[in-house]
């Protein structure tokens, strides 16, 4: 994969330059004030460029995957299939937005798949469905946020390790979902909910639009608000953040609530797509989500990462899955391959971090 | 929103107006009385060095001033008003900023982001990067910092002296009146120490009150106007730096006392009265650094 990523450097500079115009305008203004335009600009530009390059690298990986897909299967480059990749990326993509925040903030959330399942079951119980679509959506979101709050409080105020807390939540939330559903799959009867997955907005599937909105909102929060800035700070050095007057515990708790909220949204999307609520929904989402975030260049140790990278990571991961399915690879082989890809991504990350440090 | 505080303060020569006065301050942790009846006066435009051996109570004293552990009793007088400071936010509101020994910077953020961490400037609810960047550049220029290439450099890429500079700039960004520096030169080389000391001097020359905690007597005598000595939780002396020399300060730190001898203030040698050096006593070697106090 590293070979593929080194190629685009020359060809991608135009693209990178275009996107960073806004950043440069800011840098130039400040440079005038500082009276040292040369080094100031170049330092910032290099930094923006290196982040851009990584994302451009992911785009190139996507293009290469598309070429491989087209060569190995006649069905890959059809509008139906591309649509399918986007739609299947959209549900996990929303989960990944929340996961990116949590990981940048120095945590991890293993419970996302289970929360999606629990929210889908709770929102599709007979009692909830009686109140209509709005109640179902509200229920799913509330279950997500509520479970996230439990995670967050235990981690931030109970000072427990995120890994353990969310692992416990993974087991118990899925258990609760199975108990609530009595191990049966619950059918969604409310047409409005089902329509979410059936409708297009100017030719784009509604689910993809939802992902786009969530990503856009997440990007703004992460890059343009104090919440995002403080998320990076806490992931980088929680003690310094505390001394700077940031309420680290409350912030940490809210990160897990945000992840829970994303799971609630994903649950609604999945309910619409499958027309069911089930305790088996979102199986191994935690794996897909964490893998996508790492492929997207976010540091597992926190403090560094981009949302765009994570979404590109989702697309890469889902495209690989799609190619496997089109080529009729056995599920077992797919799982083995996915595992190898995750290991490769982590290896690549630790190598690039080491290089960056020297 | 000016970069610096007032140019007020009567400069160094005659000792500026008292900004902070502690009177009879006490602090205990459980049964251990760490501070006992401490009186301290900190003046505008002057660097007050707070010296003392490990465990003398320096950290407790500044933590009390900074509102991290409030004092048990005693008067906390700031700008002539008796105030109560029970948390860091109240201290910040008064214009008190602390630069911690371990610097408390986020390596993964750049200089501007670190300067404004926790107190980011906003416009219409979003981060106002341009204003923050401009003011960061102004502040650094105002402190005559020219060694930093870019305000958008990650702090991880800075040298120890530059990091200290950023930490100090962070403290003066908020119209602060009193800047407390905990061992600012502890981890620095000779040239960088020089640089930071000049910066400390400049803060005082601009009218701020500065409390400098240091184990390095050379640094203290180079930059301080007043020297306050803590010994076993008591403030045993507060003298003008011009009136004492290196060995006298060391004697004060190790338990010596100020006595008047024929109109002249002299420092007694603690080891004259004791039978030899105290086995538990301090190591008076100057330049001992890095130890927690």
Image (cartoon, coloured by chain):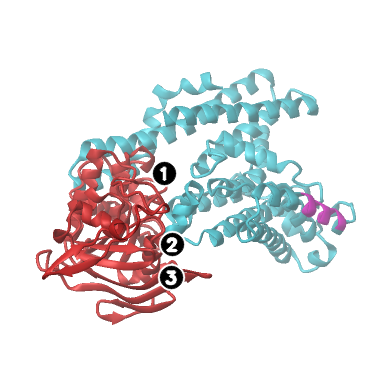
Chain colours: A cyan, B red
What label does residue B107 carry, if any? 1
Mark 3 lies on residue: B87
Q: Label 2 crowding class (10 Å Cα cut-off): few <14, some 14-19, many 20+?
A: some
B136 or B99: nearer the eye? B99
User: At which x and y percent is residue A174?
Assistant: 80, 51
x and y percent of residue A55 in the render?
48, 33
Q: Callout 2: residue from which chain?
A: A
Give the Cα separation between the discs numbered 3 and 1. Answer: 26 Å
Instruction: Answer yes or no: are tags 3 and 1 on the same subunit.
Output: yes
Q: Residue at horizontal 35%, vertical 46%? A: B289
Residue identifier under label 2 = A245
| In this picture, residue A342 sits left or right of residue B79 | right
Would you say B255 lies left or right of A209 here?
left
Q: Which residues are magenta?
A: A171-179
Q: Is residue B232 left or right of residue B43?
A: right
Of A282 and A341, the residue lying toward us? A341
Q: Which disc is residue A13 wearing? A: none
Q: Is residue B198 above or below residue B119?
A: above
State which tag comes first along the sequence, 3 or 1. 3
Identify the element where label 2 is drawn.
loop
Up-down relation of residue B238 to residue A81 (above or below):
below
């Amino acid at each position: 994969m590293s070979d593929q990523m080194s190629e685009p450097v020359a060809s991608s500079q135009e693209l990178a330059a275009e996107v960073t115009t806004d950043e440069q305008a800011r840098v130039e203004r400040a440079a005038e004030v500082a009276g040292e335009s040369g080094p100031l600009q170049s330092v910032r530009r290099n930094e923006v460029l290196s982040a851009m390059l990584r994302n451009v690298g992911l785009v190139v990986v996507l293009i290469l995957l598309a070429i491989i897909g087209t060569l190995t299967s006649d069905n890959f480059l059809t509008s139906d299939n591309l649509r399918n990749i986007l739609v299947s990326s959209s549900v996990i993509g929303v989960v990944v937005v929340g996961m990116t925040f949590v990981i940048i903030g120095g945590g991890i959330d293993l419970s996302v798949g289970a929360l999606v399942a629990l929210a889908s079951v709770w929102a599709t119980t007979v009692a909830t469905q009686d109140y209509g679509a709005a109640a179902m959506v509200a229920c799913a979101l509330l279950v997500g946020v509520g479970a996230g709050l439990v995670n967050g409080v235990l981690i931030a105020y109970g000072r427990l390790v995120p890994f353990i807390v969310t692992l416990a939540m993974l087991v118990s939330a899925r258990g609760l979902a199975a108990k609530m559903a009595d191990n049966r799959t619950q059918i969604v009867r409310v047409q409005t909910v089902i329509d979410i997955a059936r409708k297009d907005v100017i030719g784009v599937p509604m689910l993809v639009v939802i992902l786009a909105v969530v990503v856009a909102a997440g990007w703004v929060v992460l890059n343009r608000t104090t919440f995002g800035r403080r998320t990076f700070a806490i992931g980088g050095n929680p003690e310094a953040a505390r001394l700077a007057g940031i309420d680290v515990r409350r912030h940490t708790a809210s990160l897990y609530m945000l992840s829970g909220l994303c799971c609630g949204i994903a649950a609604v999307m999945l309910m619409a797509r499958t027309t069911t609520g089930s305790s088996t929904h979102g199986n191994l989402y935690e794996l897909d989500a964490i893998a996508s975030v790492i492929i997207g260049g976010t540091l597992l140790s926190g403090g560094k990462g981009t949302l765009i990278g994570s979404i590109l990571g989702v697309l890469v991961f889902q495209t690989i899955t799609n190619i496997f399915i089109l080529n009729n690879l056995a599920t077992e082989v797919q799982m083995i391959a996915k595992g190898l890809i995750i290991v490769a991504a982590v290896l690549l990350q630790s190598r690039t971090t080491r290089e960056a440090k020297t | 929103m000016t970069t610096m505080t007032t140019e007020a303060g009567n400069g160094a020569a005659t000792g500026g107006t008292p900004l902070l006065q502690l009177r009879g301050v006490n602090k205990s942790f459980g049964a251990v009385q760490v501070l006992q009846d401490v009186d301290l006066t900190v003046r505008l435009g002057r660097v007050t060095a707070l010296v003392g051996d490990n465990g003398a109570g320096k950290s407790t004293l500044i933590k009390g001033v900074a509102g991290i552990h409030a004092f048990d009793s005693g008067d906390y007088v700031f700008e002539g008003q008796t105030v109560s400071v029970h948390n860091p936010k109240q201290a910040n509101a008064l214009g008190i900023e602390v630069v911690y020994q371990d610097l408390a910077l986020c390596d993964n953020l750049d200089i501007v982001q670190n300067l404004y961490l926790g107190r980011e400037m906003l416009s219409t609810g979003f981060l106002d990067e341009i204003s923050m960047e401009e003011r960061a550049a102004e502040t650094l220029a105002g402190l005559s910092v020219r060694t930093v290439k870019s305000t958008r450099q990650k702090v991880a890429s800075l040298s120890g002296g530059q990091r200290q500079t950023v930490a100090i700039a962070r403290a003066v960004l908020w119209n602060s009146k009193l800047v407390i520096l905990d061992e600012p030169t502890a981890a620095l080389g000779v040239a960088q120490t020089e640089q930071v000391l000049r910066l400390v001097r400049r803060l005082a020359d601009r009218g701020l009150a500065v409390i400098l905690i240091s184990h390095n007597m050379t640094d203290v005598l180079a930059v301080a106007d007043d020297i306050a000595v803590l010994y076993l939780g008591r403030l045993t002396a507060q003298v003008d730096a011009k009136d004492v020399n290196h060995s006298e300060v060391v004697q004060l730190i190790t338990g010596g006392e100020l006595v008047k001898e024929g109109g002249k203030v002299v420092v007694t040698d603690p080891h004259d009265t004791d039978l030899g050096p105290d086995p538990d006593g301090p190591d008076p070697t100057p330049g001992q650094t890095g130890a927690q106090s």
